[in-house]
Amino acid sequence: MPETLEIAATASRRDWVEFSIALVAGLGLAVTAVFLCAVPLAGHMAASRDFISYWATGQQLVHGGNPYDGVAVTEIERAAGLKAGTLLMRNPPWALPMAWPLGFLNLRVAALLWSLPLLGCLLISVWLVRGLHGSPPGPIHWLGVAFTPALICLTMGQTSLFALLGLALFLRYNQTRPFAAGLALWLCALKPHLFLPFAAALAVWILLTRAWKMLAGAMLALGTSSAVAYLLAPHGWTDYLHLLRSPAVEKEFVPCLADAIRHWQWPQQAWTHFLPSLIASAWAIAYYWRRRTQWNWTHNASPLMLVSLLTAPYCFVYDQGLAIPALMDAAYRTRRRTLLIALALLIAALDAELPGVRIVSAWYLWTAPAWCAWYYAALRDPATS
C-alpha cells in the first residue's frame, strides 16, 4: 500500500510539472506564432522592431553609406514607419555581411526572411542541447523553446538567437569536430560582450589543450567576415568606435547589473561597466583551472554562461536567451519536480510583465540573477544526479 501511494504521489507531481510546462510553452508559442503570421501583413510591426536597425544598415551598405551613421539611419527608419527614436545596429563590423543582403529587400519581406532563420536557430539550439543530454523523454525541452527572453528576441528581430546557435554548436562539436566548433564561435562573436568570462576560460582551455583546429576555425571565420566587412564599409571600425563613444550610447541606461552599478556609482565613467566582467573573467579562469583535468563543456559551460550574462557590460532581457543551455542542463540533472515548476513560474512571471514594461525598464534587473539563483538551487538539491 505505501508503494502504491508513493507511485501515485510521484505521478501527481509529474502531472503538475507537465501541466505547468505545457501551459507556459503553449501561451508563449501561441503569441509568437500570431506575431510571425502578422509581420508580413502589418508594415508598422516590422518598422517598430529592433530588426529595422539591421534593415536600415543594409540600406546604408548597399548605397555605400556609413552603417553606423545615426542621422542617415534615422532618416531611413522614419521613412519606413518608425515613429520615434533611432535604432542602430551595434554589432561589431564583422557582422555587417549579415545585414548587407537586407538592403536589397523591402522591409516586410526582409522582416519575414529574417524571422524564419531566427526561429530555426532557437529550435535547432534546443534540439542540440537536448541531444547533448541523451534526448531524454519528457517536456523539459519545451521550457527552452518557450523561454521568454528567446521569444522576445525572436519578435524583436535581435541577433542573440544567432549567438545561441553558435553556443549550442560549440557545445555539441567541440570534441568531435573542433574546426567546425571554431567556425560556430563566429556566431557568438556577433555579441562578444555577452561572452567575456566564457571567452576568458575558453582561451585558457584552447592554450592548455592545444585546440589549434578550433582556433583556426574561429580565426578563419572572423578573418573572412572582417575582410568582407572592409569591402562593404572601409571605415567600418572607425565609425563603429565613434558610435560607441557617442553620448547617446554612453549615457543610455541598459537594465543589467553592470550598467546599473555604473549609473549608480560612476555615471560619468562609461568604461566602469566593464568592471564586473573583468572580475568575473578572473573568476572564470580560476573556475576552469580548478577543474581542468575533468573539464566537460556540456556541464561546465553552464555557470560560465550564466555569470557572463549576469556581469555583461550591457545585456537586455532578450539577450538572456543564451541562458537556455545552462537552464536545460540543470533541469535535466535535477530530480526535484518543484524546481521545474518554479522555473515555469519564473518564465510565466516574465511573460506577464511584457505588456506594461518597456524593454529598457530597470524592472528587468531581476531576470539574470533569477536564472543564476535557480540554476544553483537545482545543483545544490541533494536529489541532483
Image (cartoon, grey):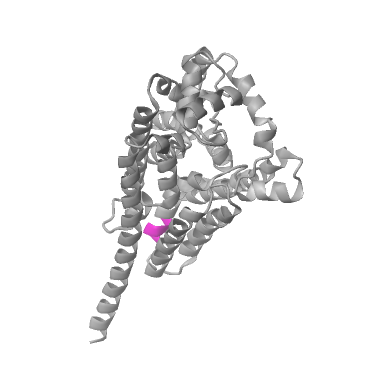
Number of labels in the image equals 0
* Residue 322 position in % (x across, y down): 46, 45
The residue at the far bottom in this view is: 1
* Residue 143 position in % (x across, y down): 36, 55
Residue pictured at 25% horizontal, 78% vertical: 8
Above or below: residue 335 compared with residue 140: below
Task: Left or right? Give the position of 257 relative to 43.
Answer: right
Quadrant for the C terminus, please: bottom left
Task: Left or right? Give the position of 323 relative to 146.
Answer: right
Residue 254 visible, this orientation: yes
Above or below: residue 1 compared with residue 224: below
Most common SS among magenta residues: helix
Observer-nearest of 340 and 251 = 251
* Residue 116 position in % (x across, y down): 33, 35
Residue pictured at 56% horizontal, 44% vertical: 315
Residue pictured at 57% horizontal, 56% vertical: 363
Above or below: residue 8 compared with residue 268: below
Residue pictured at 33% horizontal, 54% vertical: 142
Chain part drawn in magenta: 329-334
Observer-nearest of 16 and 2 = 16
Task: Left or right? Give the position of 205 relative to 20.
Answer: right
Q: Does the magenta-highlighted stretch encompass residue 232?
A: no
* Residue 123 position in % (x across, y down): 33, 43
Observer-nearest of 186 and 33 = 33
Residue 296 visible, this orientation: no
Above or below: residue 2 compared with residue 232: below
Q: Tell me the quarter of the picture where residue 120 sits.
A: top left
Quadrant for the N terminus, please: bottom left
